Structure formats: C-alpha cells, structure tokens
Image: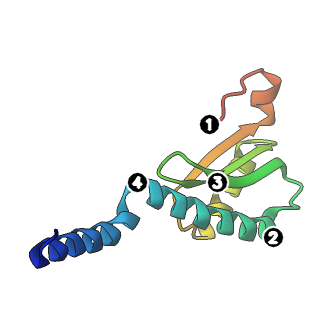
C-alpha cells in the first residue's frame, strides 16, 4: 500500500517530468521542425516562383535540432547570396541549413554545395 507521502512523491515526480519534457531534445526537435514547416510555406509564397532559383526546395531538416532546409540551384554566387539574404530577412524561427549550388559547380561536376 502506498502511503500519503508516497503519493505526494509520485505526484511531484510526474509534474516535474511533464514540466521538463518539452525542453528535452526529441520534443524540441519536433517543435522546431513544425516551426520550420510553417516558415517554409511562408517562404514559398515569397520566392516559390522566382525564376532565379532553379529546383528550389523548402522544407524541414532533422539536423541542428530541427531546422529549415533551403536547397536550390542558382546561376552564380551573387544569386546565391541574394537567396540567402531573402531567407535571413524573413526572420526564420529556427536555424537555416542552406544547400545551394551554382551552375558553375554543376558544370564542373562539383555537386557539393557551399
């Protein structure tokens, strides 16, 4: 039989566990990915049809604790920096991971983004 003190301990441990759960890595990552998904939808409205950014992909990434992934092929380094500037200016609520390749990188067979 559990004593009154035992029930109080169980209750306190349960409350503390529930209180800190959102701050543990798993739930925090899921929340950040949720925020990234919402922001990706907003960015699609801003730059989704911009012809400067070929194969533009906006979505979530589980790395970096849950982040926004921005991937595209662009004509040159200037356009790459313009895309980064637009994304940063949109005030993303999570870290942004960029995977942007220039046409020159693609022609040279260097598929690793900068």
Looking at the picture, tell me which residue is in the foreground, 76 or 29.
Answer: 29
* Of callouts 1 and 4, the N-terminal one: 4
User: Picture quarter containing residue 104?
Assistant: top right
Mark 3 touching mark 2, by CB under 8 A? no
Taking the spot 72% from the left edge, 46% from the top edge, the residue there is 71
* Of callouts 3 and 2, the N-terminal one: 2
Q: Residues within 10 Å of mark 2 (few under 14, many from 20)?
A: few
Q: Secondary structure at mark 4?
A: helix
**Which residue extends farthest top?**
109
Q: Residues within 10 Å of mark 3 (few under 14, many from 20)?
A: many
* Of callouts 1 and 2, the N-terminal one: 2
Taking the spot 73% from the left edge, 71% from the top edge, the residue there is 42
* Of callouts 4 and 2, the N-terminal one: 4
**Residue holding disc 2:** 45
**Residue holding disc 3:** 60
Q: Secondary structure at mark 3?
A: strand
Q: Secondary structure at mark 1?
A: loop
> In the rendered image of this protein, does residue 7 appear above or below residue 67?
below
Marks 1, 4: nearer the viewer: 4
Task: Tell me if 106 is positioned left or right of 33 in this view.
Answer: right
Marks 1, 3: nearer the viewer: 3
**Residue holding disc 1:** 114
Taking the spot 16% from the left edge, 70% from the top edge, the residue there is 2
Gap between marks 1 and 4 measured at Cα: 28 Å
Taking the spot 79% from the left edge, 44% from the top edge, the residue there is 74
């Amino acid at each position: 039989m559990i004593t009154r003190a035992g029930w109080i301990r169980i209750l306190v441990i349960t409350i503390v566990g529930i209180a800190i759960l959102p701050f543990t890595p798993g739930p925090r990552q899921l929340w950040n990915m949720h925020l990234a998904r919402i922001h990706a939808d907003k960015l699609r409205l801003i730059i989704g049809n911009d012809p400067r950014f070929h194969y533009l992909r906006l979505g979530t990434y589980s790395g970096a604790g849950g982040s926004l992934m921005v991937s595209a092929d662009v004509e040159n380094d200037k356009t790459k920096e313009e895309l980064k500037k637009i994304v940063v200016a949109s005030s993303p609520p999570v870290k942004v991971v960029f995977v942007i390749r220039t046409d020159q990188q693609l022609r040279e067979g260097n598929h690793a983004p900068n």
